[in-house]
Amino acid sequence: MMSNPSQYNDIRYSNNVPECILEQLEIFRNELEKAYFSRVLIRILNNKPDAFEIGIEFQSNFWLSEGVCFYNNSNWLKDKLDVNSSRLEQFYKSLEKLRCNTEQFVDIAECAIYLADTSVIISKVCNNSIVNSLDAILDTLVTNVECLMTENLELPTEIHLPILSEDNISLTNITEKSYFGFWGLYYESEEDAVIYDVRNNSTNRGDLFMIDHI
């Protein structure tokens, strides 16, 4: 069945994607928009008979500082009420519903969060890696946000993760733990990317390898 492109303006896809999948992606997209007060775009990046990969893009008017405040307040309320649930509970629920309602397995190849002052781009490193790690990634970002600032209190305009140093490029080295190794930071005042060492809370210059989804 041919789809009407005007129905799915916020989904990027090729002509061979079935209408039933587009319908489920649109439901998923709408649920994320309502839950996270953002415009959400979805791209179908890889469509195979048994699985397809999507990229999710959140576009928000929040500043990073506002996002950190909201996230920390959510943590405080969660702990105060002894609620054993994730801040991303709606995200996980909506994704699980999407997976249940499609015959193909749905994986996330990229998750991009565009805020008013910075963007965070998370790439897939192995099957289900973004889904498994997103909560911990956001926790790490919120905890270490002050370490990402320069001496002049400049925030990076882009944060890419994970990255590998050029002398350590090997598929065997890329696991979910890679998200908590090195990040690539771009600042307006810097011509080249800066490497953030997550484990040691330090930044340095050097050659790096951006991971496109595998």
Image (spheres, helix red, strand yellow):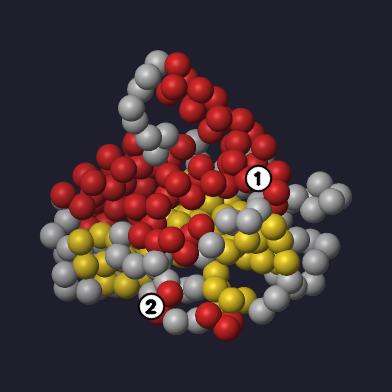
The residue positioned 58% from the left and 64% from the top of the image is 182
C-alpha separation, residue under disc 2 versus residue under disc 1:
29 Å
The residue positioned 62% from the left and 61% from the top of the image is 197
* Mark 2, other Cα within 10 Å: few <14 / some 14–19 / many ≥20: few
Is 57 on the left or on the right of 158, as rendered?
A: left
Amino acid type shown at disc 1: Val
| Numbered badge on residue 145 | 1
Q: Is residue 69 above or below residue 55?
A: above
Q: Quadrant of the N terminus?
A: bottom left
Is 163 on the left or on the right of 100, as rendered?
A: right
The residue positioned 43% from the left and 74% from the top of the image is 173
- Give coordinates of residue 107: x percent, y percent: 30, 61
The numbered mark, 2 or 1, whose residue comes first in the sequence reads 1
Q: Quadrant of residue 146?
A: top right
- Farthest residue to the top: give it: 81
The residue positioned 73% from the left and 66% from the top of the image is 204
- Give coordinates of residue 82: x percent, y percent: 37, 19
Q: Is residue 84 above or below residue 5?
A: above
Report whether residue 10 is seen: no
Q: Quadrant of residue 3?
A: bottom left
Q: Do callouts 2 and 1 mark residues in contact (Cβ within 8 Å)?
A: no
* Mark 1, other Cα within 10 Å: few <14 / some 14–19 / many ≥20: some
- Give coordinates of residue 119: x percent, y percent: 61, 54
Q: Quadrant of the C terminus?
A: bottom left
The residue singled out by tag 2 in the image is 172
Residue toward you, 24 or 103: 103
